[in-house]
Amino acid sequence: MVNVIAIQTARAGSKSVPNKNEMMIDGRPLFLHNLISAIDCNSIQHVYMSTDIPLAQKFAYETGYTIIPRPEYLTGDKASHYETMKHGLEFAEKNLSRQVDILVVLLGNNRCAHTEDLSRAISMLINDETLDSVISVGKYNMFNPLRAYRVGQHGNLENFSKFKESSAPKNKLINDKDAVGDVYFFNGSFWVMKQKSFLSNNGLLPFTWLGENIGFIEQDASCMEIDAEWQMNVVAQ
């Protein structure tokens, strides 16, 4: 049998949105939604939560996930997410006394790791030897990189991308939101990874632990992680 575990990474505090992982949505703290989805997934044998949130222990007893206590060096806002996940994996493998084959990582500031999507992602990874990982994404063509600006050295806006008008696909204007085709962003719901790909940590940027061959499951564009105040109303709907 393929050994599949899920680990949620959710720490106390936040600078972008204070205590976002603990905000109440539909009568539950935000972090609990994805944990319950993972517990309800028959493809996942064990569910863990790497955290320093005191409230998490109460729900662990009630719901059935295992707390991974975070060492102090992994609790601040400068803590490495990769090192946090790796610490959690090492804890789980020691706890289970066997190697994990597939690692599912859930974030605490999102509630869209739906059970059926987790099951499908795990199945994709098991049945396709070429895949290193399967992740959740949203399609946001309006945010394609050709339409992005950044502030230049003189304080004025400059193109983020170096593409020129002639580089746009045939019959497409460069300012068309669909000029480069569909544009996908990781939406914060889940990463499902083969253990060897995760530990190699030499894949595509920006999340090198996902490997080079990344499958995806597209979710509704309203599925997103909370990193700004305006997103709270979207996620809470």
Image: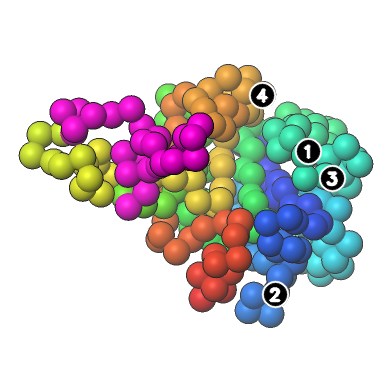
Q: Which residue is mark 4?
A: 199
Q: Secondary structure at mark 3?
A: loop
Please determine whether, in this image, residue 130 is positioned above or below residue 160.
Answer: above
Q: Which residue is mark 3?
A: 75
Q: What's the residue type where badge 1 is placed?
A: Ala
Q: Secondary structure at mark 4?
A: helix
Return the x and y of residue 167 as percentages of the image width and height: 20, 28
The mark that comes first in sequence, 1 or 4, is 1
Identify the residue at the far bottom of this view. 27
- Please tell me whether residue 83 belongs to the stretch shown in magenta: no
Q: Are marks 1 and 3 in contact (CB under 8 Å)?
A: yes
Return the x and y of residue 68 as percentages of the image width and height: 84, 47
Cα distance in 3D space between marks 1 and 3: 6 Å
Residue drawn 69% across and 80% down? Answer: 27
Q: Which residues are magenta?
A: 142-168
Q: Residues within 10 Å of mark 2 (few under 14, many from 20)?
A: few
The mark that comes first in sequence, 1 or 2, is 2
Q: What's the residue type where badge 4 is placed?
A: Leu
Q: Residues within 10 Å of mark 1 (few under 14, many from 20)?
A: few
Q: What's the residue type where badge 2 is placed?
A: Met
Cα distance in 3D space between marks 2 and 4: 34 Å
